[in-house]
Image: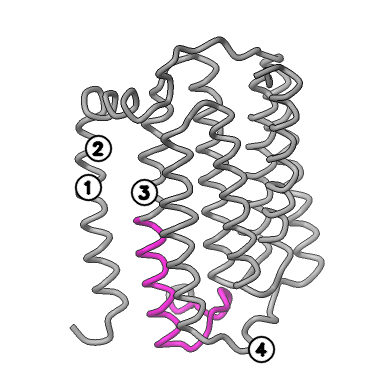
């Protein structure tokens, strides 16, 4: 039997990798993929704790997380297309109309 | 399944999973990153099966590796990215600081995990994590969030069409 701490450590590794991608990458698409990776790390934590406590509430939460991630990807990619159409770039630092 | 066999399966899925997720962040090409992410999602589905979460593992493959990543690939192909757009990245020093911060975050979480101590997984019943059992929870205890999710997906569909369409 694999102890639950292994799964939690794996989720922590995945979350850290995703966080590194979000802070260091400047391509909007890759940043989106890293956000998906972080959501998956959260899902893994939910499932590990659900397995450890023996009830299935974590499975329901993971289901909702997957649905929210699908919605987020659809809207986010639509925004990426709109930005590329109006500004012609995918570099995050060049999209700063609201900041200036 | 025996203890050693389960541990072996865990490592068989974990090593490619970490390699594929590192592949997402080290590459500059979005298509390579997307394909690495598909591989990572498949390995993660294997880990979910190991956690006896069969329904979530199937949803992972269907929704994530199927629907979401195809959407990503469509957008990447649609935008026809040039080299000068792909080549940009943060300066190396800033990347180093980012990596340092992420290692710090990992250290904090890992310390918290160690503080909880090694917990063995309990034995679970035959129907744990099956479609029937999870579906029963979804339609009784979590009925309101379930219906709210359908509304959220509807809003997301309309929003995506409104934002991405040139002229409505």
Q: CA distance from mark 2 to mark 3?
A: 11 Å
Residue neighbourhood size for the residue with mark 1, other residues' Cα within 10 Å, grouped as few (<14), some (14–19), many (≥20): few
Residue neighbourhood size for the residue with mark 3, other residues' Cα within 10 Å, grouped as few (<14), some (14–19), many (≥20): some
Residue B127 in percent (x, y) is at 40, 18
Q: Output the chain of dot 1.
A: B
Q: Output the chain of dot 4.
A: B
Q: CA distance from mark 4 to mark 2?
A: 44 Å
Image-based side of B44 in relation to B22, left or right = left
Magenta span main SS? helix
Quadrant where the N terminus of chain A lies? Answer: top right
Q: Which residues are magenta?
A: A71-97
Q: CA distance from mark 3 to mark 1?
A: 10 Å
Are circles 3 and 4 on residues that touch, CB within 8 Å? Answer: no
First reached walking from the N terminus: tag 4 or tag 1: 4
Q: Are marks 1 and 2 on the same chain?
A: yes
Q: Nearer the viewer, residue B17 or B146?
A: B17
Residue neighbourhood size for the residue with mark 2, other residues' Cα within 10 Å, grouped as few (<14), some (14–19), many (≥20): some
């Amino acid at each position: 039997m694999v102890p639950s701490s292994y799964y939690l450590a794996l989720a922590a590794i995945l979350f850290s990798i995703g966080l590194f991608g979000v802070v260091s990458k400047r391509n909007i698409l890759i940043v989106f993929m890293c956000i998906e990776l972080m959501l998956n790390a959260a899902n893994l934590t939910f499932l590990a704790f659900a397995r450890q406590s023996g009830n299935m509430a974590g499975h329901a939460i993971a289901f909702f997380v997957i649905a929210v991630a699908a919605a987020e990807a659809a809207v986010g990619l639509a925004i990426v297309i709109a930005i590329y159409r109006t500004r012609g770039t995918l570099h995050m630092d060049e999209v700063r109309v609201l900041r200036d | 399944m025996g203890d050693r066999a389960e541990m072996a399966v865990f490592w068989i899925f974990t090593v490619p999973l970490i390699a594929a997720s590192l592949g997402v962040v080290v590459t500059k090409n979005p298509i390579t990153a997307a394909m690495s992410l598909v591989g990572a999602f498949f390995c993660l589905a294997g880990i979910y099966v190991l956690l006896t979460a069969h329904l979530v593992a199937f949803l992972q493959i269907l929704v994530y590796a199927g629907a979401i990543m195809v959407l990503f690939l469509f957008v990447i192909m649609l935008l026809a990215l040039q080299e000068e757009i792909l080549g940009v990245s943060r300066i190396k020093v800033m990347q180093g600081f980012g990596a340092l911060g992420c290692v710090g975050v990992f250290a904090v979480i890992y310390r918290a995990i160690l503080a909880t101590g090694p917990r063995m997984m309990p034995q679970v019943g035959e129907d744990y994590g099956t479609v029937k059992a999870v579906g029963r929870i979804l339609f009784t205890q979590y009925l309101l969030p379930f219906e709210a999710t359908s509304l959220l997906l509807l809003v997301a569909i309309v929003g995506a069409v409104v934002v991405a369409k040139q002229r409505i």
